Image (tube, rainbow, N blue to C red):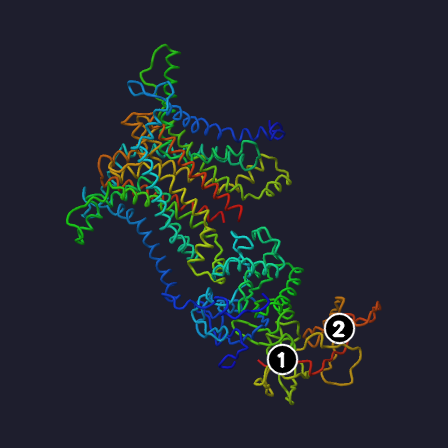
Amino acid sequence: MMQRFRERPGLRLFSLMLPGGFWLIVFFLIPLAVIGAISFMGRDDLGSPTLPWTTDAYAQAFDPIYLQLFLFSMWLSLLTTLATLIIAMPVALFIARMPKKWRNLMIFLVMIPFWTNFLVRTYALLFLLRANGPMNNILMGVGLIQEPISLLSTPFAVWVGLVYGNLPFMILPLYSSLEKFDWTLIEAANDLGANTVKAFFRVMLPLTAPGLLAGSILTFVPAVGSYITVELMGGGKTTMIGRVIATQFGTAGNWPLGSAMSLILMVIVTLAAVLYFRAGRGERMAL
Amino acid sequence: MTQATPSSELGWKRHSKPLVPYETSEKLGRFSLLAITLGAFAFLYVPIIVLVVFSFNSARTGAVWQGFTLSWYERMINNERLIDAALKSLVIATVSTIIAVIIGTLTALAMERYKFRSKGAWDALLYMPVIVPEIVMGVSLAMFFGLVSGGVKALVTAVTGVEPEVADVRGFGTLVISHVAFSMPFVYLTVRARLADFDTTLEEAAKDLGANEMRTFMRITLPLLAPGIISGALLALTLSIDDFIISFFVNGKGWNTLPIYIWSALKQGVTPEINAVSTALLLFSILIVTLSVVIQRRQQ
Amino acid sequence: MPDTPTADIGVELRDVVKKFGEVAAVDHVSLAVRNKEFFAMLGPSGCGKTTCLRMIAGFERPTSGEVYINGEAQGATPPFERNVNTVFQSYALFPHMTVAQNVAFGLEMRGVAAPEVKRRVGEALELVRLPHLASRYPKQMSGGQQQRVALARALVNRPQVLLLDEPLGALDQKLRKEMQLELKSLQTQVGITFVFVTHDQEEALTMSDRICVMSQGHALQVGTPVEIYERPNCRFVADFIGETNFIDGTVSAVNGDFATLKTAAGMPVTGRIGGGPDARPTVGANATVSVRPEKITLAEKAPESGVNAHEVRVFSVGYVGSDTRVVVKLGDANIDVWEQNSVSTLDPNYFFRPGETAWLTFKPENALVLTS
């Protein structure tokens, strides 16, 4: 047995790849193919998917209402990515410039929310901001408002929730590329006449681009498909594509439409990822 | 290039008078970095801290502090459905982590150590579960298991001649299968990163000293990979315990995990008990982070 | 130091102190670098030489004292507004830019027009003999090539002063020697003041017009290589530059420019009084005679003049080709003697052998008496 193994590296490779390959194909790829198939089905009188094949579901998904929803989801995710980037960059910079022992503590403090249950964290924000929650109490206490105001159920609340949920996912990759950054390059840029702002844009930003891109993908992708945040912070009034998909498989009972939307969402996300890998490869070539 | 030119010819003139002196703007920059950092940490931590504080508040509703109590924790411990959900989460997490770690490590070994034609495609496939939105994975698995249930029903009918009333494959098995499907790629990526830095001369040295393939793997490769494998395991464990969306779609009757319990409790209204459960989960995360940091330290 | 800098002075440090926390990395240093001079700052690591350079460049601000460039007090002027450029020890080439882009960076920052940038980048690369590698990335080049790109990137801006921080430190021995010559000729060619930081005394001696020897934050001596080697003003400089023998004793007589010491064993040793005009030894004070190994001769018989002639025992003999390095015992002390092999011979009797006795002599004017 051992002998056969040693003589045939092909066999060894096959047995190493088999469990992982099997699992991914059967429990990831085939299920995707299933919804792929459903997305091209019609519906019978009871609403169940049925043959013949049709593109009705896609026609429906590109209906202005849903198209708008897609655009809104992407727009809100883009704003989320931008906001987390603007907050995370100074934070990562500040931590990277700290003395070693403080740096580790700060990163530990970023890692705690990073590893904490997303549902719990979103709930924490909801708890703080809800109608008779602590935030309203404080605002009333200082006399800014007379009676509780609604801080939830708006696109803004969803946006805040998404930024809150994804901030650690932006800080960590940014920090890890800043940590490796050679700070004498900034001195060299200064020496050659670049002021702080120019040195940042010409030297630091291009060299930390891989971390920046990784963080952006890690923020944008979950934001586009987000469900928990929209459900809790949007209060049913603001909705995004992830929640609508869930509805199609739940109360609305329109599986083909839900499947079609899922596939469109996957295309969006895959495109973003491909862009990331393209950019990443370009960077690696230069470095 | 042969002569040093006087500064005036070079545009070396000092900027006539900067709006703010250089030193002031530098200090301002450093101060704003500090301010943003403090703000960001406040943003991240205030909601969590408020939640923890209010888990000790004796008031049932409202957000006014009415005194310290441990009664919500007491209720949490005595809540059978909650404890049941927590135990189920733990069992599912443990089983799926073990499977994910074994499969992920094997896959990492294959992908890092071998060259083969379809490698590019596998690379992409192994990345996909990381990128595909949870909601899409959830509904696709739900549809898939629905289809399998239908198949089982048809099979049972064909074999026994009696149509079963319910044939639902969803439950413990489907939860574990799904959790492995989304956590295995993370284990794979973590272990592979560690393998990439692996000094293969160590393995050659072991073989040179008379160890066969198996013993080399067990005595050299595995112990050196251990930090990567453990980090991957911690990640898989956390992902499994945290998962709500996918579990929600594949759980079936009687298999409510902790996040599903919290979600349904939330839907019925905010109670201090949820704060207590959340605090417990937070403590669990801090424990995991500490563990993973300790492992990384050891690694260096 | 004169109070007002003369037109000839390019860079001046006046009573500069730099503290990091409580530690003074640079402790009241004053020195003046002349225009178009190749000036080396030499000292062991941690002596404060790099900190001095960084203060000239503007990366650090003096805790007290002032840096002048071209007679102008620099104060808080940021590095990007100073007419100096630096060649970094690690080169600090921008990894995401090609060689040409790296070299063009400084000119672009200054808003030089594009055609002019192109022409000057070409010239600069020509100067360091790398025009064919303009479109390469730094990662794709050897250490020596990267070094030259760093030089071109700094020189293209035609700075008043070029600062070089251990620029040859990362190169191997052979390349180092080549680059030493090249740097020197480059400096003559461009006529720019070079301030060069190194811990390698040979490098400093070969290349520099003048050297400042530093130790523990102090500038100990500034002078030409010959002055530094032949007339070190203190024990540290004598020891740090080249090889030397120290013979300790107490001053027994002072006679014009010369002083005589008595060693613990009672042997008299005479040398020229060194260490500057205010360092007159007094009878009875402790002092040291420093005498370089090549300035001592060994003979089989007692010499005619009795000054600085002592009978010694040969301890070890090492043949290194150009000279023979003999270690002899003078009392308890080891004395190194380098004898030039000016005769071509295979006769073993030509050389001393361990265990033999010999007579050691050196002229008083070839030895220095150092107090402190």
Q: Residue at x 62, y 76 (%)?
A: C224
* The image quarter in which residue C254 lies: bottom right
x 78%, y 81%: residue: C302
Which label's residue is closer to the chain start, 2 or 1? 1
**Tag 2, which chain?**
C
- Going by the picture, which residue comes out furthest to the left? A146
Tell me, for residue C339, which label it has, or none.
Answer: 2
Q: Position of residue A154 (x, y in %)?
A: 25, 41
Residue type, mark 2 in image: Glu
**Residue B81: where, in percent of width, then height?**
27, 32
Report crowding for label 1: few under 14, some 14 to 19, many 20 or more residues within 10 A (C-alpha).
many
- Where disc 1 sits, the SS reads strand
Amino acid beneath label 1: Thr
Residue farthest to the front? C115
Which residue is identified by label 1? C288
Give the alpha-carbon distance from disc 2 to disc 1, as whole Å. Answer: 23 Å
Q: In the displayed structure, does residue C235 sit left or right of residue B68?
A: right
Whether residue C67 sits left or right of residue A51 in the image: it is right
Measured from the top left, where is residue C289 in percent x and y? 65, 80
Residue C165 screen position, x and y as percent: 55, 64
Which of the chains bears the disc numbered 1? C
Residue nearest the viewer, comparing B44 with C334: B44
Q: Locate residue C333: give its quadrant.
A: bottom right
Compared to residue C293, the image places residue B263 above or below, namely: above
Under circle 2, the secondary element is strand
